[in-house]
């Protein structure tokens, strides 16, 4: 669906430019957009490297382990079907920790590994298990304490106070995560009633 929307927007832009006799604007806008895209990507690499370094320092200092220990009771409640010593639990905790620091790019590989491990526990390989749905809901809502990537983008574009978005992000992602958990619980209880668990 998104592909159709993009095709419609591009085609309508080209048609409008042709009707106005300004087809040159399409070319210059495309080149300008590509240039800005590359500049933003390079800027984000430096931010990502910085925060990955900070995460490594936190990991070596034992901070991530303490945070993971703090989150473990919550994760046990959210993923009751996953054994506590299963590798999936470690990947889930790492994924949630990276998301807390707004490191979406760093969280993605851990989320994929968590999904792979959850698939090994899935009795029906063709249908996502409740634990997989819970992980997807939590990742999509993405509760974030420090939106590092957004702060970096705001810094790049000259924001006077790049970190002022922290409060808004906390509120928005908190509401989104709470809603995701409630909806996940609702559908999980319906599924359990349907299969007679």
Image (cartoon, rainbow, N blue to C red):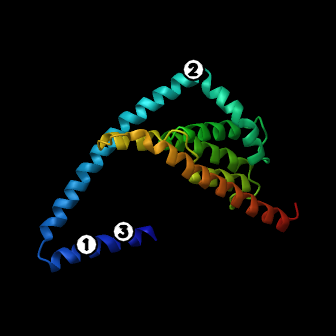
Q: Quadrant of residue 90?
A: top right
Can you give x and y, in whole percent of width and height, for residue 183 in the image? 69, 61
Left or right: 178 as drawn, with respect to 186? left
Residue 34 vs residue 87, the one in the foreground: 34
Mark 2 or mark 3, which has the lower sequence index?
3
Q: CA distance from mark 3 to mark 1?
A: 11 Å
Labels 1 & 2 near each other (Cβ < 8 A): no
Q: Which residue is mark 1?
A: 13
- Quarter location, residue 150: top left
Estimate how packed mark 3 is, as few (under 14), some (14 to 19) or many (20 or more) residues with alpha carbons within 10 Å: few
Quick one: label 2, few (<14), some, or many (20+) residues within 10 Å? Answer: few
Give the residue number, with chain letter if any, for mark 2.
60
The first of marks 3 and 1 along the sequence is: 3
- Provide the secondary structure element on which disc 2 rests: helix
Q: Mark 3 highlights which residue?
A: 6
Residue 59's place in the image compared with 37, above or below, is above
């Amino acid at each position: 669906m998104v592909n159709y929307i993009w095709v419609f927007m591009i085609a309508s832009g080209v048609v409008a430019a042709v009707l106005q006799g300004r087809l040159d604007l399409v070319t210059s806008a495309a080149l300008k957009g590509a240039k800005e895209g590359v500049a933003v990507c390079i800027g984000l690499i430096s931010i990502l490297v910085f925060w990955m370094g900070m995460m490594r320092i936190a990991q070596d200092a034992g901070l991530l382990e303490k945070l993971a220990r703090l989150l473990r009771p919550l994760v046990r409640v959210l993923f009751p079907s996953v054994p506590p010593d299963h590798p999936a639990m470690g990947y889930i905790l790492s994924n949630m920790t990276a998301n807390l620091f707004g490191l979406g790019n760093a969280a993605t590989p851990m989320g994929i590994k968590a999904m792979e491990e959850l698939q090994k526990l899935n009795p029906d390989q063709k249908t996502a298990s409740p634990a997989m749905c819970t992980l997807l809901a939590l990742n999509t809502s993405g509760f974030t304490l420090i939106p590092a990537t957004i702060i970096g983008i705001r810094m790049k574009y000259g924001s006077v106070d790049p970190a002022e978005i922290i409060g808004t992000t906390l509120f928005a992602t908190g509401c989104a995560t709470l809603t995701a958990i409630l909806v996940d619980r609702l559908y999980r209880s319906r599924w359990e009633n349907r299969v007679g668990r």
